[in-house]
């Protein structure tokens, strides 16, 4: 049955992608095939071999260790708070460590470790996919730096990009998650699914772009380098990353307060009027999609609700809900929804991406706004593809 649901999930992604494609006659089947095979190889190694499983376990343990190190700074500043035994404050235990992880990213960027990895990983990805050097570079770099910062690394190229290429890099930005967020995600969902989803999402975004937005990349592309580096003093760069991490944590906290309160309001309102919660109602809408991805029938309503919650709010709201109900879901359902949630595919991210590009080029920002719904649909399809592939192994 696993193979059947792998096929149904892929068909779902392809059919919807074909329906919203801007150029159905030139869908890049060769690129899709190569990237999909790479996804199967990566997911097989990570989830179906002892070496891969142990590697993911060590990566998860490493990020858990980083969270403990981050606790040193958090406790120093907030140590006066009295928290009842067995409880934790989400803002302190999950969001505040982002500041420390962001500082580490800044250090690795400053000493040119990240630029080296991103450059050559992008080069290798381009050789396999033929998506274009700029697109391949961006797909890798956005998984490390996240947005909006990643757009600054290609700010000189953005005004020159065609509408098709803008779609591809925007889809990559929505499908990937920044390294600074990984440790926080691992507090809510199993680390192995977070790591696998990061790898698969890089490729899923390019696969969906090859269906929804096919084009032949320009041959004169040249790899770009991350602009932030040794031009500024070390402690100035480090301070900037620390402040950026803190602002990110505050932004996520504000969005969580607003979105969770909104969902609570809608749940109570719908219960009062039609005797069904809002999240249960939207669960029915996404349940068929969850079923085609391979989620067991008994779990499709819960998983469908989480999928819709992520789309309407953000991944943190959905992960927080999943963290509370994971024990009621099957192993397969947990695997699929955990991988699905690891991306920025939601309505709020459209505004971030549009605003980031608009700050660099008003004209290009207007292009992104024009195809924003198709962009959100494509990024959601990328998450569906990633979740389907992970579910194949459970």
Image (cartoon, grey):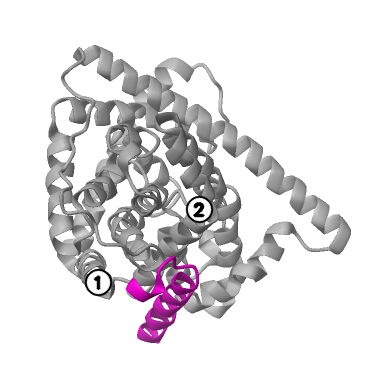
Local SS, label 2:
loop
Which SS does the magenta portion mostly show? helix
Looking at the image, tell me whether mark 2 or mark 1 is earlier in sequence order.
1
How many numbered discs, if any? 2
Residue 73, numbered circle: none
Q: Quadrant of the N terminus?
A: bottom left
Residue positioned 68% across, 59% down in the render? 279
Q: Is residue 231 left or right of residue 168?
A: left
Residue at 15% x, 63% y is: 128
* Label 1 environment density (alpha carbons within 10 Å; few <14, some 14–19, many ≥20): some
Residue 118 in view (yes/no) = yes
Judge by depth and name the residue closer to the eye, 323 or 267.
267
Q: Is residue 114 magenta?
A: no
Instruction: Give coordinates of residue 143: x percent, y percent.
Output: 30, 46
Which residue range is magenta in the image? 1-26
User: Which residue carries the number 1 mark?
Assistant: 40
Seen from this angle, which residue lies furthest right? Answer: 273
Q: Is residue 239 above or below residue 221?
A: above
Tell me if mark 2 has few (under 14), some (14-19) or many (20+) residues whose alpha carbon lies within 10 angstroms of its own: few
Observer-nearest of 53 and 279: 279
Q: Is residue 204 above or below residue 137?
A: below
Label 2 vs label 1: CA separation?
30 Å
Relative image position of residue 220 (x, y in whole percent)? 15, 49
Secondary element at tag 1: helix
The quarter of the rendered structure image containing the C terminus is bottom left
The residue singled out by tag 2 in the image is 371
Which quadrant would residue 282 be assigned to in this image?
bottom right
Q: Could you say which quadrant of the image residue 231 lies in?
A: top left
- Please say if 10 is above or below 358: below
The quarter of the displayed image where residue 145 is located: top left
Q: Position of residue 360 (x, y in %)?
A: 39, 30
Name the residue at 28% across, 41% down: 144
């Amino acid at each position: 049955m696993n193979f059947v649901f792998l096929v149904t999930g892929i068909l779902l992604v392809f059919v919807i992608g074909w329906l919203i494609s801007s150029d159905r006659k030139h869908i890049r089947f060769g690129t899709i095939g190569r990237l999909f095979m790479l996804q199967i190889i990566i997911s097989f190694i990570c989830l179906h071999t002892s070496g891969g499983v142990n590697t993911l376990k060590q990566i998860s343990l490493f990020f858990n260790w980083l969270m403990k190190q981050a606790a040193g700074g958090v406790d120093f500043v907030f140590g006066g708070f009295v928290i009842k035994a067995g409880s934790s404050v989400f803002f302190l235990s999950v969001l505040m460590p982002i500041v420390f992880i962001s500082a580490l990213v800044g250090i690795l960027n400053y000493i040119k470790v990240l630029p080296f990895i991103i450059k050559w990983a992008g080069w290798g990805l381009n050789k396999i996919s033929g998506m274009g050097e700029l697109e391949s570079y961006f797909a890798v770099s956005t998984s490390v730096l996240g947005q909006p910062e990643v757009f600054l690394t290609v700010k000189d190229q953005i005004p020159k990009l065609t509408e098709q290429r803008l779609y591809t890099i925007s889809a990559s930005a929505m499908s990937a998650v920044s390294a600074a967020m990984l440790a926080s995600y691992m507090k809510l969902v199993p680390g192995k699914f977070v790591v696998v989803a990061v790898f698969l999402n890089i490729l899923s975004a390019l696969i969906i772009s090859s269906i929804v937005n096919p084009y032949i990349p320009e041959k004169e592309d040249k790899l770009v380098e991350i602009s932030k580096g040794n031009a500024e003093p070390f402690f100035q760069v480090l301070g900037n990353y620390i402040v950026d991490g803190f602002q990110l944590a505050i932004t996520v906290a504000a969005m969580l307060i607003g979105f969770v309160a909104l969902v609570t309001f809608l749940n109570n309102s719908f219960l009062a009027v039609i005797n069904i919660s809002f999240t249960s109602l939207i669960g029915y809408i996404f349940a068929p999609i969850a079923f085609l991805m391979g989620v067991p029938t008994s779990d499709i309503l819960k998983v469908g609700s989480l999928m819709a919650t992520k789309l309407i709010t953000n991944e943190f709201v959905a992960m927080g809900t999943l963290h509370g109900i994971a024990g009621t879901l099957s192993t397969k359902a947990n695997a699929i929804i955990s991988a699905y949630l690891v991306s920025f595919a939601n309505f709020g991210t459209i505004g971030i991406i549009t605003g980031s590009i608009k700050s660099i080029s008003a004209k290009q920002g207007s292009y992104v706004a024009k195809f924003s719904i198709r962009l959100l649909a494509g990024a959601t399809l990328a998450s569906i593809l990633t979740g389907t592939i992970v579910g194949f192994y459970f």
